[in-house]
Protein backbone atom coordinates (compact mmCIF):
# COMPACT_ATOMS: atom_id res chain seq x y z
CA UNK A 1 0.00 0.00 0.00
CA UNK A 2 1.42 3.38 -1.01
CA UNK A 3 2.31 5.82 1.78
CA UNK A 4 0.16 8.90 2.11
CA UNK A 5 1.65 12.07 0.61
CA UNK A 6 2.55 14.75 3.14
CA UNK A 7 3.80 17.28 0.59
CA UNK A 8 3.16 17.71 -3.13
CA UNK A 9 4.90 20.42 -5.20
CA UNK A 10 3.85 20.90 -8.83
CA UNK A 11 5.35 23.26 -11.42
CA UNK A 12 6.99 25.57 -8.86
CA UNK A 13 8.54 28.71 -10.36
CA UNK A 14 10.57 31.22 -8.36
CA UNK A 15 12.95 34.00 -9.35
CA UNK A 16 14.75 37.01 -7.92
CA UNK A 17 14.57 39.70 -10.58
CA UNK A 18 15.98 38.15 -13.75
CA UNK A 19 17.64 35.29 -11.85
CA UNK A 20 15.57 32.10 -12.14
CA UNK A 21 15.76 29.84 -9.07
CA UNK A 22 13.10 27.22 -9.93
CA UNK A 23 11.34 26.70 -13.22
CA UNK A 24 8.59 24.05 -13.17
CA UNK A 25 10.01 22.17 -10.14
CA UNK A 26 7.93 19.12 -9.17
CA UNK A 27 8.48 16.76 -6.24
CA UNK A 28 6.56 14.92 -3.52
CA UNK A 29 7.35 13.61 -0.02
CA UNK A 30 5.38 10.74 1.54
CA UNK A 31 4.56 10.20 5.20
CA UNK A 32 7.49 8.72 7.12
CA UNK A 33 10.13 9.56 4.51
CA UNK A 34 13.37 11.14 5.66
CA UNK A 35 14.59 13.19 2.70
CA UNK A 36 17.96 14.86 2.21
CA UNK A 37 17.93 17.80 -0.22
CA UNK A 38 21.16 18.33 -2.20
CA UNK A 39 22.12 21.10 -4.63
CA UNK A 40 25.04 23.38 -5.37
CA UNK A 41 25.29 26.69 -3.53
CA UNK A 42 23.16 29.32 -5.20
CA UNK A 43 20.67 26.83 -6.65
CA UNK A 44 18.03 27.62 -4.05
CA UNK A 45 18.08 24.99 -1.29
CA UNK A 46 17.29 27.43 1.53
CA UNK A 47 14.94 29.38 -0.74
CA UNK A 48 12.97 26.20 -1.45
CA UNK A 49 12.68 25.44 2.28
CA UNK A 50 11.47 29.02 2.90
CA UNK A 51 8.87 28.68 0.15
CA UNK A 52 7.66 25.30 1.44
CA UNK A 53 7.41 26.66 5.00
CA UNK A 54 5.42 29.68 3.80
CA UNK A 55 8.17 32.20 4.62
CA UNK A 56 8.66 33.26 0.98
CA UNK A 57 6.38 33.69 -2.03
CA UNK A 58 6.69 32.15 -5.49
CA UNK A 59 5.67 33.10 -9.01
CA UNK A 60 3.58 30.10 -10.01
CA UNK A 61 2.90 26.46 -9.29
CA UNK A 62 1.34 24.81 -6.25
CA UNK A 63 2.45 23.54 -2.82
CA UNK A 64 -0.01 21.21 -1.07
CA UNK A 65 0.35 19.69 2.41
CA UNK A 66 -1.85 16.98 3.82
CA UNK A 67 -4.48 18.55 6.03
CA UNK A 68 -4.04 18.81 9.80
CA UNK A 69 -0.32 18.05 9.98
CA UNK A 70 1.95 19.99 12.30
CA UNK A 71 5.06 21.51 10.66
CA UNK A 72 8.24 22.74 12.35
CA UNK A 73 11.01 24.60 10.50
CA UNK A 74 14.57 25.20 11.67
CA UNK A 75 15.99 28.07 9.61
CA UNK A 76 19.69 28.39 8.93
CA UNK A 77 20.09 31.61 10.96
CA UNK A 78 17.31 31.80 13.58
CA UNK A 79 16.30 35.10 15.20
CA UNK A 80 14.34 35.40 18.46
CA UNK A 81 12.32 38.26 19.87
CA UNK A 82 14.45 40.38 22.19
CA UNK A 83 13.86 40.25 25.91
CA UNK A 84 12.84 36.62 26.34
CA UNK A 85 14.95 34.04 28.18
CA UNK A 86 16.21 30.79 26.66
CA UNK A 87 13.64 28.55 28.39
CA UNK A 88 10.78 30.87 27.52
CA UNK A 89 11.87 31.01 23.85
CA UNK A 90 12.07 27.23 23.70
CA UNK A 91 8.82 26.60 25.64
CA UNK A 92 6.40 29.54 25.99
CA UNK A 93 3.99 27.33 27.98
CA UNK A 94 3.96 27.58 31.79
CA UNK A 95 3.22 23.84 32.07
CA UNK A 96 5.97 22.39 34.30
CA UNK A 97 6.03 19.00 32.54
CA UNK A 98 6.62 20.71 29.21
CA UNK A 99 9.28 22.95 30.74
CA UNK A 100 11.02 19.89 32.19
CA UNK A 101 11.11 18.37 28.70
CA UNK A 102 12.46 21.67 27.33
CA UNK A 103 15.24 21.70 29.94
CA UNK A 104 16.17 18.12 29.03
CA UNK A 105 16.31 18.93 25.32
CA UNK A 106 18.35 22.09 25.87
CA UNK A 107 20.79 20.20 28.10
CA UNK A 108 21.23 17.56 25.39
CA UNK A 109 22.08 20.43 23.04
CA UNK A 110 24.61 21.84 25.55
CA UNK A 111 22.48 24.84 26.58
CA UNK A 112 22.32 24.95 30.39
CA UNK A 113 21.79 28.64 31.22
CA UNK A 114 18.00 28.60 30.86
CA UNK A 115 17.52 32.19 32.05
CA UNK A 116 20.05 33.77 29.69
CA UNK A 117 18.45 36.42 27.41
CA UNK A 118 18.22 35.14 23.84
CA UNK A 119 19.66 38.38 22.44
CA UNK A 120 22.92 37.55 24.25
CA UNK A 121 23.31 34.17 22.55
CA UNK A 122 25.99 33.46 19.96
CA UNK A 123 24.88 32.33 16.51
CA UNK A 124 25.61 28.69 17.40
CA UNK A 125 23.72 28.89 20.70
CA UNK A 126 20.72 30.48 18.98
CA UNK A 127 20.73 27.63 16.43
CA UNK A 128 20.64 25.04 19.22
CA UNK A 129 17.82 26.80 21.06
CA UNK A 130 15.84 26.98 17.80
CA UNK A 131 16.48 23.26 17.23
CA UNK A 132 15.17 22.47 20.73
CA UNK A 133 12.15 24.68 20.02
CA UNK A 134 11.41 22.77 16.78
CA UNK A 135 11.71 19.35 18.45
CA UNK A 136 9.60 20.50 21.43
CA UNK A 137 6.62 21.06 19.12
CA UNK A 138 6.59 17.31 18.23
CA UNK A 139 5.88 17.99 14.53
CA UNK A 140 4.57 15.56 11.95
CA UNK A 141 6.78 17.19 9.31
CA UNK A 142 10.18 18.58 10.32
CA UNK A 143 12.17 20.87 7.99
CA UNK A 144 15.82 21.40 8.91
CA UNK A 145 18.24 23.83 7.22
CA UNK A 146 21.86 22.93 8.12
CA UNK A 147 21.01 21.61 11.62
CA UNK A 148 24.59 20.54 12.46
CA UNK A 149 26.26 23.92 11.90
CA UNK A 150 27.86 24.93 15.22
CA UNK A 151 27.10 21.55 16.84
CA UNK A 152 29.96 19.53 18.26
CA UNK A 153 30.25 15.83 17.45
CA UNK A 154 28.52 14.48 20.58
CA UNK A 155 25.45 16.66 19.97
CA UNK A 156 25.44 15.81 16.25
CA UNK A 157 25.50 12.10 17.07
CA UNK A 158 22.64 12.57 19.55
CA UNK A 159 20.62 14.36 16.85
CA UNK A 160 21.46 11.58 14.41
CA UNK A 161 20.11 8.95 16.81
CA UNK A 162 17.02 11.06 17.56
CA UNK A 163 16.10 11.53 13.89
CA UNK A 164 16.79 7.88 13.06
CA UNK A 165 14.54 6.62 15.86
CA UNK A 166 11.76 9.19 15.27
CA UNK A 167 8.72 8.37 13.12
CA UNK A 168 8.36 11.96 11.90
CA UNK A 169 8.63 12.95 8.24
CA UNK A 170 11.82 14.89 7.52
CA UNK A 171 13.11 17.25 4.84
CA UNK A 172 16.68 18.31 5.54
CA UNK A 173 19.44 20.36 3.93
CA UNK A 174 22.85 19.49 5.39
CA UNK A 175 26.48 19.18 4.29
CA UNK A 176 27.01 16.43 6.93
CA UNK A 177 27.33 13.38 4.71
CA UNK A 178 27.36 10.89 7.60
CA UNK A 179 24.04 12.37 8.78
CA UNK A 180 22.62 12.01 5.26
CA UNK A 181 23.90 8.45 5.03
CA UNK A 182 22.61 7.26 8.40
CA UNK A 183 19.30 9.14 8.68
CA UNK A 184 17.87 9.65 5.19
CA UNK A 185 16.05 7.00 3.18
CA UNK A 186 15.71 9.22 0.13
CA UNK A 187 17.86 11.88 -1.54
CA UNK A 188 16.50 14.61 -3.80
CA UNK A 189 19.04 16.48 -5.92
CA UNK A 190 18.05 19.75 -7.58
CA UNK A 191 20.05 20.40 -10.72
CA UNK A 192 19.32 22.48 -13.79
CA UNK A 193 15.83 23.38 -12.43
CA UNK A 194 14.90 19.69 -12.13
CA UNK A 195 14.48 17.40 -9.11
CA UNK A 196 16.15 13.97 -9.32
CA UNK A 197 14.95 11.46 -6.72
CA UNK A 198 17.00 8.54 -5.35
CA UNK A 199 15.27 6.04 -3.04
CA UNK A 200 18.14 5.27 -0.69
CA UNK A 201 20.74 6.88 1.54
CA UNK A 202 23.65 9.13 0.54
CA UNK A 203 25.94 6.24 -0.49
CA UNK A 204 23.23 4.88 -2.78
CA UNK A 205 22.69 8.37 -4.21
CA UNK A 206 26.38 8.74 -5.10
CA UNK A 207 26.34 5.43 -6.95
CA UNK A 208 23.13 6.08 -8.87
CA UNK A 209 23.95 9.72 -9.61
CA UNK A 210 27.17 8.64 -11.30
CA UNK A 211 25.23 6.12 -13.36
CA UNK A 212 22.86 8.92 -14.45
CA UNK A 213 25.73 11.22 -15.39
CA UNK A 214 27.44 8.44 -17.33
CA UNK A 215 24.21 7.74 -19.19
CA UNK A 216 23.74 11.44 -19.97
CA UNK A 217 27.33 11.67 -21.21
CA UNK A 218 26.82 8.64 -23.42
CA UNK A 219 23.56 10.06 -24.76
CA UNK A 220 25.25 13.37 -25.50
CA UNK A 221 28.00 11.64 -27.49
CA UNK A 222 25.33 9.82 -29.47
CA UNK A 223 23.44 13.07 -30.05
CA UNK A 224 26.62 14.84 -31.20
CA UNK A 225 27.36 12.10 -33.74
CA UNK A 226 23.80 12.28 -35.02
CA UNK A 227 23.97 16.08 -35.13
CA UNK A 228 27.12 16.03 -37.30
CA UNK A 229 25.46 13.61 -39.70
CA UNK A 230 22.21 15.62 -39.85
CA UNK A 231 24.06 18.93 -40.18
CA UNK A 232 25.86 17.58 -43.22
CA UNK A 233 22.51 16.50 -44.67
CA UNK A 234 20.97 19.94 -43.97
CA UNK A 235 23.82 21.68 -45.77
CA UNK A 236 23.58 19.42 -48.82
CA UNK A 237 19.78 19.39 -49.03
CA UNK A 238 18.47 21.57 -51.94
CA UNK A 239 16.11 24.30 -50.84
CA UNK A 240 13.46 23.08 -53.28
CA UNK A 241 13.18 19.78 -51.44
CA UNK A 242 12.48 21.47 -48.09
CA UNK A 243 8.83 20.45 -47.93
CA UNK A 244 9.54 16.82 -48.68
CA UNK A 245 11.79 16.33 -45.60
CA UNK A 246 10.07 18.67 -43.17
CA UNK A 247 9.87 16.00 -40.44
CA UNK A 248 13.63 15.48 -40.66
CA UNK A 249 14.32 19.21 -40.49
CA UNK A 250 12.11 19.52 -37.44
CA UNK A 251 13.93 16.62 -35.76
CA UNK A 252 17.24 18.31 -36.55
CA UNK A 253 16.15 21.57 -34.91
CA UNK A 254 14.89 19.68 -31.84
CA UNK A 255 18.24 17.95 -31.58
CA UNK A 256 20.10 21.25 -31.98
CA UNK A 257 18.05 22.86 -29.22
CA UNK A 258 18.67 19.89 -26.91
CA UNK A 259 22.42 20.10 -27.44
CA UNK A 260 22.49 23.85 -26.88
CA UNK A 261 20.76 23.25 -23.57
CA UNK A 262 23.64 20.98 -22.64
CA UNK A 263 24.28 19.75 -19.11
CA UNK A 264 27.18 21.67 -17.70
CA UNK A 265 28.45 19.18 -15.13
CA UNK A 266 30.57 21.73 -13.39
CA UNK A 267 32.64 21.28 -10.28
CA UNK A 268 35.14 23.46 -8.51
CA UNK A 269 38.65 22.79 -9.84
CA UNK A 270 41.32 23.59 -7.27
CA UNK A 271 44.64 23.04 -9.02
CA UNK A 272 46.30 26.19 -7.68
CA UNK A 273 50.06 26.07 -7.22
CA UNK A 274 51.39 25.95 -3.66
CA UNK A 275 54.39 28.13 -2.86
CA UNK A 276 57.74 26.56 -1.92
CA UNK A 277 57.96 25.65 1.75
CA UNK A 278 61.26 25.24 3.57
CA UNK A 279 62.38 22.73 6.18
CA UNK A 280 61.29 24.85 9.13
CA UNK A 281 57.53 25.36 9.26
CA UNK A 282 56.14 25.79 12.80
CA UNK A 283 58.03 24.85 15.95
CA UNK A 284 56.13 25.14 19.24
CA UNK A 285 58.16 24.78 22.42
CA UNK A 286 56.55 24.58 25.90
CA UNK A 287 53.66 26.85 24.86
CA UNK A 288 51.04 27.74 27.48
CA UNK A 289 47.95 29.92 27.29
CA UNK A 290 45.11 30.72 29.67
CA UNK A 291 42.32 33.25 30.04
CA UNK A 292 41.91 33.71 33.77
CA UNK A 293 41.13 30.29 35.25
CA UNK A 294 40.43 28.78 31.83
CA UNK A 295 43.53 26.93 30.60
CA UNK A 296 43.75 26.60 26.80
CA UNK A 297 47.27 25.20 26.38
CA UNK A 298 49.64 23.80 28.97
CA UNK A 299 53.32 23.18 28.17
CA UNK A 300 52.61 22.10 24.58
CA UNK A 301 55.48 21.30 22.21
CA UNK A 302 55.29 20.20 18.57
CA UNK A 303 57.24 20.48 15.30
CA UNK A 304 55.27 20.50 12.04
CA UNK A 305 56.69 18.62 9.06
CA UNK A 306 56.20 18.99 5.29
CA UNK A 307 52.85 17.93 3.79
CA UNK A 308 51.42 17.20 7.24
CA UNK A 309 47.60 17.14 7.48
CA UNK A 310 46.30 17.65 11.02
CA UNK A 311 42.71 17.70 12.24
CA UNK A 312 41.76 19.48 15.47
CA UNK A 313 38.83 18.14 17.49
CA UNK A 314 37.32 18.88 20.88
CA UNK A 315 34.21 20.26 22.51
CA UNK A 316 33.07 23.81 21.89
CA UNK A 317 34.93 26.35 24.02
CA UNK A 318 38.11 24.34 24.71
CA UNK A 319 40.28 26.75 22.68
CA UNK A 320 40.61 25.27 19.19
CA UNK A 321 40.19 28.60 17.39
CA UNK A 322 42.45 30.29 19.95
CA UNK A 323 45.17 27.77 19.10
CA UNK A 324 44.89 28.63 15.41
CA UNK A 325 45.11 32.34 16.18
CA UNK A 326 48.28 31.72 18.18
CA UNK A 327 49.82 30.06 15.12
CA UNK A 328 48.75 33.11 13.11
CA UNK A 329 50.37 35.50 15.64
CA UNK A 330 46.96 37.08 16.31
CA UNK A 331 47.01 35.92 19.95
CA UNK A 332 50.23 35.67 21.94
CA UNK A 333 51.09 32.75 24.26
CA UNK A 334 51.55 33.38 27.99
CA UNK A 335 54.80 31.45 27.91
CA UNK A 336 56.85 29.30 25.57
CA UNK A 337 57.95 29.93 22.00
CA UNK A 338 56.36 29.67 18.53
CA UNK A 339 59.01 29.79 15.80
CA UNK A 340 57.74 30.30 12.22
CA UNK A 341 59.70 29.38 9.11
CA UNK A 342 60.81 32.19 6.80
CA UNK A 343 59.19 30.57 3.72
CA UNK A 344 55.81 30.16 5.44
CA UNK A 345 52.91 31.49 3.36
CA UNK A 346 49.66 30.98 5.25
CA UNK A 347 46.17 30.76 3.80
CA UNK A 348 43.69 31.32 6.63
CA UNK A 349 40.03 30.40 6.24
CA UNK A 350 38.36 32.02 9.27
CA UNK A 351 35.20 30.64 10.84
CA UNK A 352 33.48 34.02 10.66
CA UNK A 353 34.26 34.34 6.94
CA UNK A 354 35.26 37.55 5.17
CA UNK A 355 33.20 40.74 4.98
CA UNK A 356 33.20 41.66 1.30
CA UNK A 357 32.15 45.19 0.24
CA UNK A 358 28.48 44.89 -0.69
CA UNK A 359 28.88 47.35 -3.58
CA UNK A 360 31.80 45.42 -5.09
CA UNK A 361 31.42 43.12 -8.07
CA UNK A 362 32.63 39.54 -7.78
CA UNK A 363 35.35 40.10 -10.40
CA UNK A 364 36.60 43.17 -8.50
CA UNK A 365 37.13 41.10 -5.32
CA UNK A 366 39.46 38.75 -7.20
CA UNK A 367 41.34 41.27 -9.37
CA UNK A 368 42.10 43.31 -6.23
CA UNK A 369 44.35 40.34 -5.30
CA UNK A 370 45.73 39.41 -8.72
CA UNK A 371 44.87 39.68 -12.42
CA UNK A 372 46.38 36.26 -13.16
CA UNK A 373 46.79 33.07 -11.12
CA UNK A 374 49.53 30.45 -11.59
CA UNK A 375 48.34 26.85 -11.61
CA UNK A 376 50.17 23.75 -10.41
CA UNK A 377 51.01 22.63 -13.96
CA UNK A 378 52.67 25.98 -14.78
CA UNK A 379 49.79 27.49 -16.75
CA UNK A 380 48.54 31.01 -16.03
CA UNK A 381 44.88 31.81 -15.79
CA UNK A 382 43.04 35.13 -15.83
CA UNK A 383 40.95 36.17 -12.84
CA UNK A 384 37.77 35.62 -14.85
CA UNK A 385 38.80 32.13 -15.91
CA UNK A 386 39.74 31.30 -12.34
CA UNK A 387 36.32 32.43 -11.11
CA UNK A 388 34.65 30.16 -13.66
CA UNK A 389 36.49 27.25 -12.08
CA UNK A 390 34.76 28.24 -8.84
CA UNK A 391 31.34 28.10 -10.54
CA UNK A 392 31.05 31.84 -11.10
CA UNK A 393 30.01 32.26 -14.78
CA UNK A 394 30.72 35.59 -16.53
CA UNK A 395 27.24 36.89 -15.77
CA UNK A 396 27.66 36.29 -12.03
CA UNK A 397 31.21 37.70 -12.04
CA UNK A 398 29.82 41.11 -12.92
CA UNK A 399 27.04 40.90 -10.32
CA UNK A 400 27.35 42.59 -6.96
CA UNK A 401 28.50 40.62 -3.93
CA UNK A 402 25.27 41.61 -2.17
CA UNK A 403 23.37 39.31 -4.54
CA UNK A 404 25.36 36.16 -3.65
CA UNK A 405 23.94 33.46 -1.39
CA UNK A 406 25.72 32.59 1.86
CA UNK A 407 27.27 29.51 0.27
CA UNK A 408 28.43 31.47 -2.81
CA UNK A 409 30.13 34.01 -0.54
CA UNK A 410 31.95 31.16 1.23
CA UNK A 411 33.06 29.78 -2.13
CA UNK A 412 34.31 33.22 -3.17
CA UNK A 413 36.16 33.49 0.15
CA UNK A 414 37.86 30.12 -0.49
CA UNK A 415 38.77 31.34 -3.98
CA UNK A 416 40.51 34.46 -2.58
CA UNK A 417 42.55 32.31 -0.19
CA UNK A 418 43.75 29.67 -2.65
CA UNK A 419 44.62 32.13 -5.43
CA UNK A 420 47.41 33.51 -3.20
CA UNK A 421 49.28 30.16 -3.54
CA UNK A 422 49.63 29.36 0.19
CA UNK A 423 51.88 26.56 1.42
CA UNK A 424 50.22 26.21 4.85
CA UNK A 425 46.41 26.13 5.01
CA UNK A 426 44.71 26.92 8.33
CA UNK A 427 41.01 26.11 8.05
CA UNK A 428 38.57 27.01 10.85
CA UNK A 429 35.20 25.30 10.21
CA UNK A 430 35.54 25.36 6.40
CA UNK A 431 32.56 23.05 5.84
CA UNK A 432 29.88 25.47 7.09
CA UNK A 433 27.77 26.75 4.18
CA UNK A 434 29.80 25.02 1.44
CA UNK A 435 27.81 22.64 -0.76
CA UNK A 436 28.71 18.96 -0.87
CA UNK A 437 30.12 19.16 -4.42
CA UNK A 438 32.57 21.90 -3.39
CA UNK A 439 33.53 19.96 -0.24
CA UNK A 440 34.33 16.86 -2.30
CA UNK A 441 36.73 18.79 -4.51
CA UNK A 442 38.26 20.62 -1.53
CA UNK A 443 38.96 17.21 0.03
CA UNK A 444 40.64 16.03 -3.17
CA UNK A 445 42.67 19.25 -3.32
CA UNK A 446 43.89 18.84 0.29
CA UNK A 447 44.87 15.21 -0.38
CA UNK A 448 47.14 16.36 -3.26
CA UNK A 449 48.25 19.64 -1.65
CA UNK A 450 52.05 19.88 -1.42
CA UNK A 451 51.96 22.06 1.68
CA UNK A 452 50.67 21.62 5.25
CA UNK A 453 47.07 21.71 6.42
CA UNK A 454 45.59 22.14 9.87
CA UNK A 455 41.79 22.14 10.12
CA UNK A 456 39.14 22.56 12.81
CA UNK A 457 35.83 20.99 11.86
CA UNK A 458 32.82 19.24 13.34
CA UNK A 459 32.19 17.57 9.97
CA UNK A 460 33.03 13.92 10.65
CA UNK A 461 33.17 12.92 6.97
CA UNK A 462 35.45 15.83 6.07
CA UNK A 463 37.85 15.05 8.92
CA UNK A 464 38.03 11.39 7.92
CA UNK A 465 38.97 12.42 4.38
CA UNK A 466 41.65 15.04 5.11
CA UNK A 467 43.32 14.33 8.49
CA UNK A 468 46.33 12.03 8.84
CA UNK A 469 46.27 12.45 12.63
CA UNK A 470 44.44 14.53 15.22
CA UNK A 471 45.13 17.05 17.96
CA UNK A 472 42.46 16.18 20.53
CA UNK A 473 41.70 19.13 22.82
CA UNK A 474 40.54 17.45 26.03
CA UNK A 475 40.17 20.60 28.15
CA UNK A 476 42.28 22.14 30.91
CA UNK A 477 45.15 22.65 28.48
CA UNK A 478 45.63 18.95 27.65
CA UNK A 479 46.19 18.05 23.98
CA UNK A 480 46.58 14.44 22.86
CA UNK A 481 48.12 13.60 19.48
CA UNK A 482 45.96 10.73 18.17
CA UNK A 483 47.79 8.85 15.39
CA UNK A 484 44.88 7.83 13.18
CA UNK A 485 41.62 8.93 11.54
CA UNK A 486 38.64 10.66 13.08
CA UNK A 487 36.40 7.57 12.96
CA UNK A 488 39.15 5.54 14.62
CA UNK A 489 39.37 8.16 17.36
CA UNK A 490 35.61 8.09 17.97
CA UNK A 491 35.69 4.29 18.22
CA UNK A 492 38.65 4.49 20.59
CA UNK A 493 36.83 7.09 22.67
CA UNK A 494 33.81 4.79 23.07
CA UNK A 495 36.08 1.89 24.06
CA UNK A 496 37.84 4.09 26.59
CA UNK A 497 34.55 5.28 28.11
CA UNK A 498 33.31 1.69 28.33
CA UNK A 499 36.59 0.75 30.00
CA UNK A 500 36.23 3.52 32.58
CA UNK A 501 32.69 2.36 33.39
CA UNK A 502 33.93 -1.20 33.74
CA UNK A 503 36.74 0.01 36.01
CA UNK A 504 34.19 1.70 38.23
CA UNK A 505 32.17 -1.50 38.41
CA UNK A 506 35.26 -3.58 39.08
CA UNK A 507 36.19 -1.31 41.98
CA UNK A 508 32.99 -2.16 43.87
CA UNK A 509 33.90 -5.77 44.80
CA UNK A 510 37.36 -4.58 45.87
CA UNK A 511 35.70 -2.38 48.47
CA UNK A 512 33.83 -5.43 49.69
CA UNK A 513 37.16 -7.20 50.17
CA UNK A 514 38.04 -4.68 52.84
CA UNK A 515 34.79 -5.20 54.78
CA UNK A 516 34.95 -6.75 58.26
CA UNK A 517 35.11 -10.53 58.33
CA UNK A 518 32.06 -12.51 59.46
CA UNK A 519 31.86 -13.09 63.20
CA UNK A 520 31.53 -16.89 62.92
CA UNK A 521 33.41 -17.96 59.80
CA UNK A 522 33.97 -21.55 58.79
CA UNK A 523 37.57 -22.72 58.77
CA UNK A 524 39.48 -22.86 55.48
CA UNK A 525 41.06 -26.10 54.41
CA UNK A 526 44.73 -26.14 53.41
CA UNK A 527 43.70 -26.39 49.74
CA UNK A 528 41.35 -23.38 50.06
CA UNK A 529 44.07 -21.31 51.77
CA UNK A 530 46.40 -22.14 48.92
CA UNK A 531 43.69 -21.15 46.36
CA UNK A 532 43.16 -17.84 48.16
CA UNK A 533 46.88 -17.02 48.02
CA UNK A 534 46.97 -17.82 44.31
CA UNK A 535 43.96 -15.55 43.69
CA UNK A 536 45.62 -12.68 45.55
CA UNK A 537 48.80 -13.13 43.51
CA UNK A 538 46.83 -13.24 40.24
CA UNK A 539 44.83 -10.14 41.21
CA UNK A 540 48.08 -8.25 41.74
CA UNK A 541 49.44 -9.39 38.36
CA UNK A 542 46.20 -8.43 36.59
CA UNK A 543 46.21 -4.99 38.22
CA UNK A 544 49.81 -4.35 37.09
CA UNK A 545 49.10 -5.51 33.52
CA UNK A 546 45.97 -3.33 33.37
CA UNK A 547 47.96 -0.29 34.52
CA UNK A 548 50.56 -0.86 31.77
CA UNK A 549 47.84 -1.19 29.12
CA UNK A 550 46.08 1.98 30.27
CA UNK A 551 49.35 3.90 30.11
CA UNK A 552 49.90 2.70 26.54
CA UNK A 553 46.34 3.55 25.52
CA UNK A 554 46.63 7.06 26.92
CA UNK A 555 49.98 7.72 25.22
CA UNK A 556 48.31 8.60 21.91
CA UNK A 557 51.06 6.85 19.93
CA UNK A 558 49.50 3.46 19.19
CA UNK A 559 48.28 2.47 15.72
CA UNK A 560 44.61 1.57 15.45
CA UNK A 561 45.08 -2.24 15.43
CA UNK A 562 47.04 -2.10 18.68
CA UNK A 563 44.41 0.20 20.19
CA UNK A 564 41.80 -2.44 19.49
CA UNK A 565 44.00 -5.29 20.72
CA UNK A 566 44.92 -3.60 24.00
CA UNK A 567 41.37 -2.40 24.64
CA UNK A 568 40.10 -5.96 24.14
CA UNK A 569 42.74 -7.27 26.55
CA UNK A 570 41.64 -4.79 29.22
CA UNK A 571 38.10 -6.13 28.85
CA UNK A 572 39.41 -9.67 29.40
CA UNK A 573 41.32 -8.54 32.49
CA UNK A 574 38.20 -6.90 33.94
CA UNK A 575 36.14 -10.06 33.36
CA UNK A 576 38.81 -12.28 34.96
CA UNK A 577 39.19 -9.88 37.90
CA UNK A 578 35.45 -9.96 38.56
CA UNK A 579 35.41 -13.76 38.34
CA UNK A 580 38.24 -14.47 40.80
CA UNK A 581 37.26 -11.62 43.14
CA UNK A 582 33.89 -13.29 43.71
CA UNK A 583 35.68 -16.55 44.53
CA UNK A 584 38.02 -14.70 46.89
CA UNK A 585 34.98 -13.24 48.69
CA UNK A 586 33.50 -16.72 49.12
CA UNK A 587 36.72 -17.99 50.62
CA UNK A 588 37.22 -14.93 52.81
CA UNK A 589 33.93 -15.62 54.58
CA UNK A 590 35.39 -18.88 55.83
CA UNK A 591 38.74 -17.42 56.87
Image (cartoon, rainbow, N blue to C red):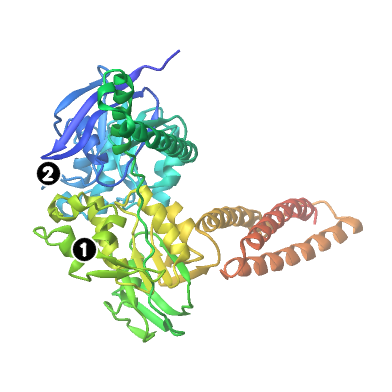
Q: Check disc 1 and report its element: helix, strand or loop.
A: loop
Q: Nearer the viewer, residue 44 or 511?
A: 44
Q: Is residue 544 left or right of residue 260?
A: right
Q: What's the residue at 29%, 72% (across, down)?
A: 420
Tell me: residue 323, above or below residue 251.
below
Res. 81 mark? 2
SS for callout 2: loop
Q: Nearer the viewer, residue 142 or 172?
A: 172
Neighbour tally class for label 2: few under 14, some 14-19, many 20 plus, Cα within 10 Å: few
Q: Position of residue 240 (x, y in %)?
A: 25, 23
Left or right of 273 in this view: 383: left
Q: Quadrant of residue 500?
A: bottom right
Up-down relation of residue 114 to residue 429 (above or below) = above
Which residue is tagged 1?
354
- Residue 177, label in figure: none
In which quadrant of the rendered image does the N terminus lie?
Answer: top left
Q: Is residue 280 left or right of residue 355?
A: right
Amino acid sequence: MAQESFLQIDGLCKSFGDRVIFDGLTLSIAQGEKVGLIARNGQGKSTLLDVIAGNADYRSGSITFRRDIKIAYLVQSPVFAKGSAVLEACCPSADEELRLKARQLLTKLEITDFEKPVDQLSGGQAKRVALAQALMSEPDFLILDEPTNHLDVEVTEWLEEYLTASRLTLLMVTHDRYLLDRVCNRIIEIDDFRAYSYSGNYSYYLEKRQERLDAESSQRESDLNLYRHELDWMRRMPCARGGKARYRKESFHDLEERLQHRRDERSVSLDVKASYIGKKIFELEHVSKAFGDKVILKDFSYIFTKMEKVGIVGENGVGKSTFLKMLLDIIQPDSGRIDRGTTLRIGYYAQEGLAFPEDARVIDVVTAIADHIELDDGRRMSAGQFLQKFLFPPKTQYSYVSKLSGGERRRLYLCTILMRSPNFLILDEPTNDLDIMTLQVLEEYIAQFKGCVIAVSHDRYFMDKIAQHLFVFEGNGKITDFPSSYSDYMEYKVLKEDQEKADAQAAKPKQAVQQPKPSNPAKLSFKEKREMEQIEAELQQLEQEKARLEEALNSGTLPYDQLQEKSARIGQIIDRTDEITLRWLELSEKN
